[in-house]
Image: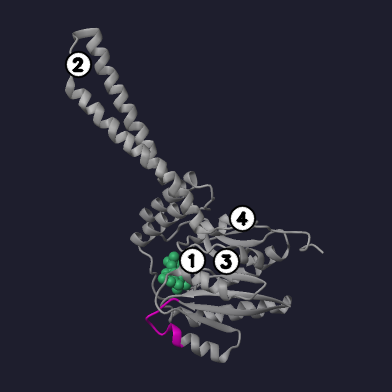
Amino acid sequence: MELISVIVPCYNEQESLPLFYDEIRRVSAEMQKENDVAFEYIFVNDGSRDDTLKILRDMARGDERVRYVSFSRNFGKEAAMYAGLEHAEGDYVVILDADLQHPPKYIPEMYGYVKSGEYDCAGTRRVSRKGEPKLLSFFARKFYKIINSISQTEIVDGAQDFRFMKRKMVDAILDMPEYNRFSKGIFSWVGFNTKYIEVENTERVAGTTTWNFWKLFKYSLEGIFAFSLAPLAVPAFLGVLFMLIAFVTALVVIIRAIAFDGILTCFAMLIAAIFFVVGVQLFCMGIVAQYISKIYMDAKGRPIYIAAETEKDKK
Ligand code: UDP
Ligand code: MG
């Protein structure tokens, strides 16, 4: 029998939780009719201020499949997902939101894809941004454009955190102990074959979202800094640019002096000298940045490679 771990990060979800619990039980029972699978539900209470923990305690008392981890304070969804993965014991793990924006009804289909052996992971990708403020959609699109042009890790536009994964992939994610976690990047960095199911945007069943424009903006910067070293190249680039400006300015002044009036304009030469010195400084910062980028990548402690299969897996 195979065990499926369902991971649910919860932050102030007292209204959604009972609805979610009903739905996940319905879907589990349906899957168990056709497959030899068992379930565990791991709820991570991310420092909720409402009755979420009380509800989880009650649920755990009445149902041995329910497990929970309750944080000492709010650590954020990324930390909650990591904790869930760490506690999961299943052969398969699925992560989804408590607000039913990631409808559990897709789990059987996802299981089918992964079970077939063709994919290691199945996720959902929203095809439309219906119901989202226009300005937010605009910035979201720009963000995906920017990050994909400066990062080697592909960040799939519209891909959600709703993922059904094989144990191998879960272990690979747990092998990435970095503190600043950007899951959209991590899911993609670890590799493996992912099947994306295209879905429509679903509204939250109850409660309110904790994300606002500012938080999303900070989160997108998090993604850029965690998965791209491009910003560190900015000083070196500016340094070269400034030195070039200095050379051209000096050249123009000298040529003009020699060819035309014989007057060397000190003011223009001074400007050129300033540009040159600033350029050298920026360029040196760029050199230091190269070393910092190496330290930064080493400090993340990411694995050097991840094996998807060896001869031991196919017996
Ligand atoms: N969540 C969490 N910690 C937080 C914020 C959110 O665990 O600090 C959970 C939340 O309970 C939900 C999921 O992460 O299950 C997605 O959050 P939300 O619905 O607020 O985000 P949105 O769907 O609007 O992106
Ligand atoms: Mg939501």
Q: Earlier in the sequence, mark 3 or mark 1?
A: 3
Disc nearer the start of the sequence (4/2): 4
Q: Which quadrant of the figure has residue 259?
A: top left
Which residue does the image show at 48% across and 44% down from the upper left? Answer: 149
Q: Residue at x 37, y 37 (%)?
A: 283
* Residue shown at 22% from the left, 28% from the top: 271
How far is the residue under mark 3 from the one under mark 1? 29 Å
| Residue under pointer 2 | 264
Q: Which residue is mark 3?
A: 174
Name the mark nearer the viewer: 1 or 4.
4
Which of disc 4 and disc 3 is earlier in sequence?
Answer: 3
Of residue 56 and residue 254, the one placed in the foreground of this image is: 254
Which residue is at 62% across, 62% downward? 122
Residue 287 is left or right of residue 37, and the answer is: left
| Disc 2 Cβ-to-ligand 1 distance below 8 Å | no
Residue 225 is at least partly visible in this image: yes
Please rate how many residues cluster around mark 4, counting C-alpha atoms within 10 Å: few if below 14, some from 14 to 19, many from 20: some
Q: Position of residue 55 (x, y in %)?
A: 47, 86
- SS at mark 2 in the image: loop
Point out the stretch of residues depicted in magenta.
46-54
Q: Residues within 10 Å of mark 3 (few under 14, many from 20)?
A: few
| Secondary structure type for disc 4 | loop
Q: CA distance from mark 1 to mark 4?
A: 27 Å
- The crowd level at tag 2 (other Cα within 10 Å; few <14, some 14-19, many 20+) is some
Q: Quadrant of residue 115?
A: bottom right
User: Which residue bears the numbered disc 4?
Assistant: 191
Q: Nearer the viewer, mark 3 or mark 2?
A: 2
